Image: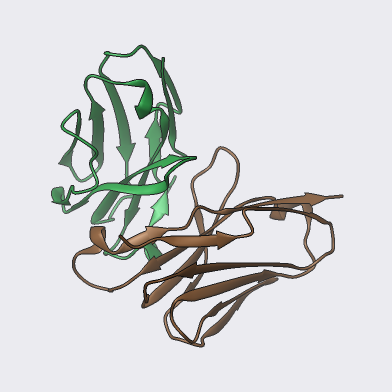
């Protein structure tokens, strides 16, 4: 398996634009997590899914952020409208069961909003 | 909320030296994890600890679950250039349910190894 695949690796967009980040989890993994990493706040869990169903989205910063998992092999994190403070590295991770011990991270998407 | 502190924030060492770093919290955790993040990559799990006092090794890495359950330590022996990266600790208060609420990462220790 190629591991967790995220796209794009880098995204530069203008403030106010819609941004969509994509993730393909490891095949067979039931859990999918979205994290955000910044210098100020470190790694923060935004939302996680179990069997394509959102379980906990309390980490989503505000209504501008939304995440979907239409099937077991694909998830998106959307920001609309984007703001400069959304600039960060966004990671997707997947695991066979809940518990970060068994979670594998993707390479991340570095988002810059100008 | 729960917060983890890591020290040192950064360190520069000579190749071959041993490294020690720690992670502390005011909260009690049931699980401690140590991750390494290389530039441009996602975190990779190094060691997982599940019991107070537990000492676990992974090659040149050794980590310990503090007796108070409020801290953990990571040691790297005989450092090599590929040890460069950011080391994160992560703590979890429960193994089941409410995962999103009780799992936190520390801010990281940035390690540089000089040849």
Residue visible at 43% across and 85% down in the picture: B51
Q: Nearer the viewer, residue B108 or B35?
A: B108
Residue A8, image x and y in percent? 40, 26
Residue B75, image x and y in percent? 67, 71
Q: Nearer the viewer, residue A98 or B88?
A: B88
Residue visible at 16% across and 53% down in the picture: A51
Colour assigned to chain B in the rendering is brown
Figure disc tally: 0
Q: Nearer the viewer, residue A27 or B93?
A: B93
Q: Is residue B28 above or below residue A1?
A: below
Q: Nearer the viewer, residue A72 or B42?
A: B42
Q: Is residue A43 above or below residue B55?
A: above
Residue visible at 57% across and 80% down in the picture: B56
In-image side of A23 versus A53 (left or right): right
Q: Quadrant of residue A110?
A: top left
Colour assigned to chain A in the rendering is green
Residue A113, image x and y in percent? 39, 19
In-image side of B80 versus A43 (left or right): right
In-image side of A24 versus B83 (left or right): left
């Amino acid at each position: 398996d190629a591991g967790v695949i995220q796209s794009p690796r880098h995204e530069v967009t203008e403030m106010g634009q819609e941004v969509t980040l994509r993730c393909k989890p490891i095949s067979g993994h039931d859990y999918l997590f979205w994290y955000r990493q910044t210098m100020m706040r470190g790694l923060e869990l935004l939302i996680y899914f179990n069997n394509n169903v959102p379980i906990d989205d309390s980490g989503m910063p505000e209504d501008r952020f939304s995440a979907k998992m239409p099937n077991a092999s694909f998830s998106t994190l959307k920001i609309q409208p984007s703001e400069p403070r959304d600039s960060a590295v966004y990671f997707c991770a997947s695991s066979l069961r809940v518990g970060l011990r068994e979670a594998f991270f993707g390479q991340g998407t570095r988002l810059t909003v100008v | 909320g729960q917060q983890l502190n890591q020290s040192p924030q950064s360190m520069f060492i000579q190749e071959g030296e041993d490294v020690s770093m720690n992670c502390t919290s005011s909260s009690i955790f049931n699980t401690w994890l140590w991750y390494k993040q290389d530039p441009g990559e996602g975190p990779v799990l190094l060691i997982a600890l599940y019991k107070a006092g537990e000492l676990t090794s992974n090659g040149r890495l050794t980590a310990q679950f503090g007796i108070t359950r409020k801290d953990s330590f990571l040691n790297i022996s005989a450092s090599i250039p590929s040890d460069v990266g950011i080391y994160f600790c992560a703590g979890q208060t429960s193994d089941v349910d409410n995962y999103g609420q009780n799992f936190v990462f520390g801010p990281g220790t940035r390690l540089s190894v000089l040849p």
